[in-house]
Image (cartoon, rainbow, N blue to C red):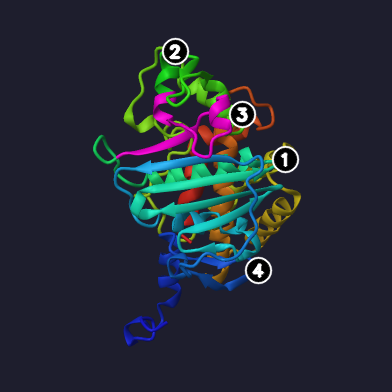
Amino acid sequence: DEIWKEGGYNGVFDEMLTLMERFELCYALPNSPNEFIVPQLLSPDKPSYNWDDINQIRLHYRYTFMPKGIVTRLIVRLNRLIVDQKTVWQSCVVFESEGAQAEVSELYHNRYIHIKSKGINRKALMTIITHQIDEINSTFDFDEQLKVSQLIPCNCTTCKQAESPYFFPKEVLNKAMSVGRKNLQCQDSFDGVSIRELFYDTFDREVIEHEEEAYPKGRELTKHEYHFHGPVDSVIPYNQGNIIQQFDHRTLIQELKPFKQLIEAEKEVGYISREEYEDLIDILAEIQETPDPKEGQKRRWKRWLGTAATSVSNFIKGRFEKGTDTVIQEEVKAWLKEGGLEKLMELISSF
């Protein structure tokens, strides 16, 4: 507020707010679209909440150099999942979805992100969170010197009972799979463990099947394929440098038709809840009926469609790439192959 009171910012509040949203610096409260939260300005003190460690799963990210803002950008992306919209602070957040909770905490000076998830759908929530972190990581130029590793906990008998189990680097597991290895040795107990079971204990089974298809025996890996879902642009090639500059209502309506069918497919298989589906259908109807929206409406559409597009991207990565899915209609598959979702993302970015 102190900065924006300066005379030079008169009349550009909406533009500044849109930029902050675009660069994942703030988000609107779900039930208060005119109230915005800037995660970097939240309290550094951990709020009080209950957490028991029974049947939780864990995963870490380790960085040789850790860019600032990874967890705060994650908070912006998944803000609708924050428990009571209160269990969040500068370096940590607790998400909740479909009977599962997950705590994500950043230890910046140790260059670590720790994730733990519990509840009936803990693997699904873990998969959603790691996908978002992988996408955020992909916006940085990591290389052989500046590395990030996803660390998956060992599930041998010793490690299951240990407070600090051994963690396998994800790129090691991928490389072992690429040369046909099915098992690796825990470096604490020296017991053999199944690579497939390591994944089954942490992630959704459908995503694991995609992982096995992405790294068949004998296939050489590139440094860009060390993310859990393979290359970030393998399904949705999003070209940030090619943004449509003007709001194009007719094209938006056209691109939303196949997008709506994907949302309906998500609901059919239970990937999104009935409430989320109904909210999105209401937004799509509002867009259909409003060819000349106000800036506030466009910001709200951008938030909702951006979240929905992320959900659709996760959904596709688990189903569409296999080429065997019958839930997604053929014309929608053709739309995806032709870059339809990329075009829609460009339209959304132009709001």
Q: Earlier in the sequence, mark 1 or mark 2?
A: 2
Q: Amino acid at mark 3?
A: Glu
Which residue is identified by label 1? Answer: 270
Marks 1/3: CA–CA distance: 14 Å
Nearest-to-viewer mark from 1 and 2: 2
Residue 149 % position (x, y): 38, 37
Q: Amino acid at mark 2?
A: Lys
Residue 31 is labelled as: 4
Q: Earlier in the sequence, mark 1 or mark 4?
A: 4
The residue closer to the viewer here, 253 or 98, is 98
Q: Quadrant of residue 272?
A: top right
Residue 77 % position (x, y): 51, 55
Residue 217 is labelled as: 2
Residue 274 % position (x, y): 75, 49
Instruction: Give SS at disc 3.
Output: helix
Q: Amino acid at mark 4?
A: Asn
Marks 3/4: CA–CA distance: 33 Å
